[in-house]
């Protein structure tokens, strides 16, 4: 189901709760909502659709990947950049990392551990920040 984008800074500033296997339907809502906003969005966190759960979706070019309870285990090669967000107007400066390693559960609730680089790594970091109540 396509959900409305949350713009309330108080709500977005709260840390998300851990996701459970019963939250897989939220991952499907994130897929639908990202698809509906494809022209201006490459990732989302569940709190952006009004659900305070630690769930993100990331566009990886040919596919979208949902991650439940993503944890960044390592981050290398910091760089300065500017980012925008559907929940905000304009862009803001931030520091991101070129290479990250992330542990998460997939849509089948299997534990994954993967390395990401470049643009995909940047999107993941932005969305994980959302889950931690950090809005750029």
Image (spheres, rainbow, N blue to C red):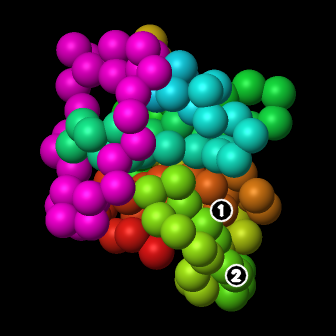
Q: Residue at x 34, y 14 (%)?
A: 25
Relative horizontal placement of residue 12, taking residue 102 as reference (left or right): left
For marks 1 and 2, the one nearer the N-term is 2
Give x and y (percent) for residue 17.
17, 44
Q: Marks 2 and 1: in contact by CB < 8 Å?
A: yes
Find the residue positioned furthest to the right: 62
Quadrant in the rendering for residue 62 = top right
Relative horizontal placement of residue 60, taking residue 124 as reference (left or right): right
User: Count the marks: how many?
Assistant: 2
Q: Is residue 18 above or below residue 117?
A: above
Look at the numbered disc 2 and give the secondary structure of its residue. strand
Q: Which mark is residue 62?
A: none
Q: Is residue 27 above or below residue 129?
A: above
Residue 2 belongs to the span the image colors magenta: yes
Q: Is residue 68 above or below residue 130?
A: above
Q: Nearer the viewer, residue 25 or 88?
A: 88
Give x and y (percent) for residue 108.
44, 12
Label 1, label 2: how far apart the Cα atoms are: 10 Å
Q: Residue at x 65, y 62 (%)?
A: 122
Q: Nearer the viewer, residue 44 or 109?
A: 44
Circle 1 crowding by C-alpha within 10 Å: few under 14, some 14–19, many from 20: many
Q: Which residues are magenta?
A: 1-29
Q: Residue at x 58, y 44 (%)?
A: 43
Q: Which mark is residue 81?
A: 2
Q: Nearer the viewer, residue 9 or 122?
A: 9
Residue 109 makes an appearance in the image: no
Residue 44 belongs to the span the image colors magenta: no
Which mark is nearer the camera, 1 or 2? 2
Look at the numbered disc 1 and give the secondary structure of its residue. helix
Residue 37 makes an appearance in the image: yes
Instruction: Name the residue that disc number 1 marks.
Output: 122
Give x and y (percent) for residue 82.
67, 79
């Amino acid at each position: 189901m396509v959900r409305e984008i949350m713009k309330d800074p108080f709500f977005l500033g709260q840390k998300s709760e851990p996701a459970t296997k019963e939250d897989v339907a939220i991952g499907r809502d994130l897929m639908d909502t990202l698809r509906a906003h494809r022209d201006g969005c490459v990732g989302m966190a569940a709190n952006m659709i009004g659900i305070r759960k630690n769930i993100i979706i990331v566009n990886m070019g040919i596919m979208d990947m949902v991650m439940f309870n993503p944890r960044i285990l390592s981050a290398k090669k910091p760089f300065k950049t500017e980012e925008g967000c559907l929940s905000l107007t304009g862009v803001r400066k931030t520091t991101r990392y070129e290479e990250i390693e992330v542990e998460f559960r997939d849509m089948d609730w299997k534990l994954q551990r993967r390395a990401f680089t470049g643009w995909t790594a940047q999107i993941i970091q932005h969305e994980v920040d959302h889950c931690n109540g950090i809005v750029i």
